Image (cartoon, rainbow, N blue to C red):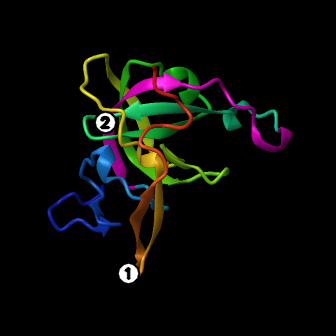
Amino acid sequence: MAHKGPDAPVVSGINSGSTVKLKDLVPAATNNVNTTFIVLDKEARAAPPHGRADAREETCLALVADETAAAHFLLWGAERDAFEPGDIVRLTGGIFSYHRSNSLVLRAGRRGRAEKVGEFTMLFVETPNMSEVKWVRDPGDPRRMVQEAVVSPHSQVFKPLQ
């Protein structure tokens, strides 16, 4: 069983057992994101890359948010059908990193887990969208990423209602 005491290992500045708000997400290649959010919108399914017919490789992008920020959440395989707008989702062991098209997404990954824990009753904001932030390596510590600029205050994939 994993050690969860106060001296538990820290990965990328986030205690691996703690919950993080979306505004505190930082790109990393480790499964250390534990958070809860509401699904606001979903895109249509995307076909598997390179002409593969494997349904496990199909993806779907969703706009998710909590009371501090929003982000794009990548749904893989069975996750595509498991979550709908209005669902409240708890993500454990997730990843916030760059995906194939060089877009920054939150995802469960192979070791993470996303589960529905409720519906419709969660406060949220749609800005800032952490997937629309440009990140660079910290000159003082190249292992860390820091925000360089905001590409857009809201999602460029899911346009706000006018």
87 w.r.t. 49: above or below: above
Quarter containing the C terminus: top left
Q: Marks 2/1: CA distance?
A: 29 Å
| Residue range (magenta) | 32-51
Please state the horizontal and vertical placement of residue 11, each as a whole percent of the image: 34, 66
Which residue occupies the foreground of this view, 6 or 157? 157
In this figure, what is the number of numbered marks?
2
Residue 34 relative to residue 161: left or right: left
- Residue shown at the point (46%, 51%) measured from the top left: 95
**Picture quadrant where residue 45 is located:** top right
In depth, the one of 156 and 8 nearer the eye is 156
Residue drawn 54% across and 48% down? Answer: 110
Residue under label 1, please give it: 141
Q: Position of residue 158 (x, y in %)?
A: 52, 30
Question: Which label number is shown at residue 22?
Answer: none
Residue sitting farthest toward the bottom: 140
Left or right, 120 with reference to 61: left
Tell me, yes or no, whether the highlighted magenta stretch contains residue 114. Answer: no
Task: Give whichever of 116, 154 is nearer the camera.
Answer: 154
Tell me which amino acid carries mark 2. Answer: Thr
Q: Residue at x 31, y 36 (%)?
A: 36
The residue under label 1 is which amino acid type? Answer: Asp
Viewer-nearest of labels 2 and 1? 1
Give left or right: position of 138 versus 103.
Answer: left
Per the image, the residue denoted by label 2 is 36
Q: Quadrant of the N terminus?
A: bottom left
Relative to residue 145, is residue 42 depicted above or below? above
Q: Is residue 25 above or below residue 125?
A: below
Q: For label 1, count other residues whose C-alpha is less than 10 Å away and answer few (under 14), some (14-19) or many (20+).
A: few
Indicate the quadrant where residue 114 lies: top left
Farthest residue, direction front = 162
